[in-house]
Image (spheres, grey):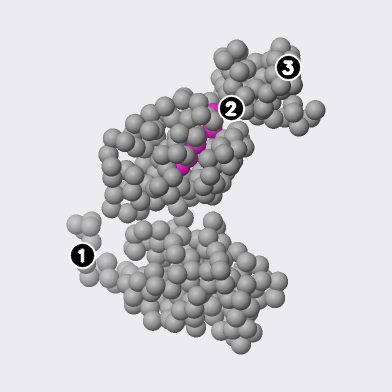
Amino acid sequence: MNQNVSPTADGDAFSRMAERVAGQHWPAGALYVVATPIGNLGDLGLRAWQALARADVIAAEDTRSSRSLLDAWGISTPLMAAHRHNEAAAAQDICTRLEQGQRVALVSDAGAPAVSDPGARVVRTVRAAGHPVVPVPGPSAVITALMGSGVTSDENPAFAFAGFAPPKAAARQRWLRSWCALPAPVLMFESPHRLAATLADLLEVCGPQRQLTIARELTKRFEQIATMPLSQAAEWLAADTHREQGEFVLIVHAAESRPDDQAGMEDPATAALLDALLETLSVRDAARVAAKVTGQPRDALYALALARRGGA
């Protein structure tokens, strides 16, 4: 704490700000889509706190985990279940409540509802029924990972969010080839028990020099954000057994573009080589062989091979 600010002054400032937030417009008959902490309970915003406290009911992905958050913040609003297995029925129930003038808050286990979490179907149904939807922004694993990695810039703010990779190896490799061919950083979620396999697949698809950021346990006590070439990722993971635990965001950096790369891509000889290889090989194998022959980046050659096969 800043030594120039006393606890009493801190409390007074919080109270004044809470009063200002409470005095804002809180329409009835509206669905409040509320982002909740992804690990640190202190990350719940004042507006989110007020929205949850003022709601007549909170539709939660997991009522037990949400109750822990509500208890920590002294919120006694009743809960109802709204998860992927009952989302259609829950959406209709919510619409009925909104027609009665109730305020309904929608939350997921952590982070922003309807962003790689249940909730989008509820939002669509509510909007289609003509009821207002009020998003209350807050914590997001995607944005948190971007903030901690420095992978984007003012000049090039683009990134892609891919969600969870497929669980089976063959489907995962196809999925990774498609996403990692994009000329922008790609963020994905991964679970601890599949992390090693996904890192191995990324190495196969993107090559050893491609940069990777691993962000684990974001906002929590053991938060780690590490950037390394893919050739070092498996070694990094194995160096500490604790690194295999928690929740992960992976950021595959955009492939570095060297001045001679684009010239190579426009070289008729490169195109002819790929066309010849594609007569007998898959896109992946054609890109792999062409990379060995020309020394050009495999991911760029993969994108070119994919485009040439599509054009053919």
Is disc 3 placed on a helix, strand or loop? helix
Q: What kind of residue is marked 1?
A: Ser
The answer to whether the residues at label 2 and label 1 have Cβ atoms under 8 Å apart is no
The residue indicated by pointer 3 is: 276
Return the residue at label 2. Answer: 299
Measuring from the top left, give residue 309's x and y in whole percent. Answer: 74, 28
Residue 185 locus on image (x, y percent): 53, 38
Q: Secondary structure at mark 1?
A: loop
* Circle nearer the viewer, 3 or 2: 3
For the question of whether residue 49 can be seen, the reply is no
For the residue pair 266 and 238, the one nearer the viewer reads as 238
Q: Classify 10 Å Cα crowding around label 1: few (below 14), some (14-19), many (20 and above).
A: few
Q: CA distance from mark 2 to mark 1?
A: 55 Å
| Residue 253 covered by magenta stretch | yes
**Looking at the image, which residue is at 53% across and 40% down?**
169
Per the rendered image, the range of residues in magenta is 248-255
- Residue type at the position of mark 2: Asp
Residues at discs 3 and 2 in contact (Cβ within 8 Å)? no
Dot placed on the residue nearer the N-terminal end, 1 or 3:
1
Looking at the image, the residue that sits furthest to the bottom is 100
Q: Picture quarter containing residue 308? A: top right
Q: Which residue type does callout 3 highlight?
A: Ala
Q: Position of residue 27 (x, y in %)?
A: 57, 79
Q: Which numbered marker is on residue 6?
A: 1
Count every numbered label the image shows and give the total.
3
Task: Name the residue located 59 percent from the left edge and 79 percent from the top edge.
Answer: 94
Compare marks 3 and 2 and give the one earlier in the sequence: 3
Name the outermost residue toward the right: 312
* Disc 1 versus disc 3: nearer the observer: 3
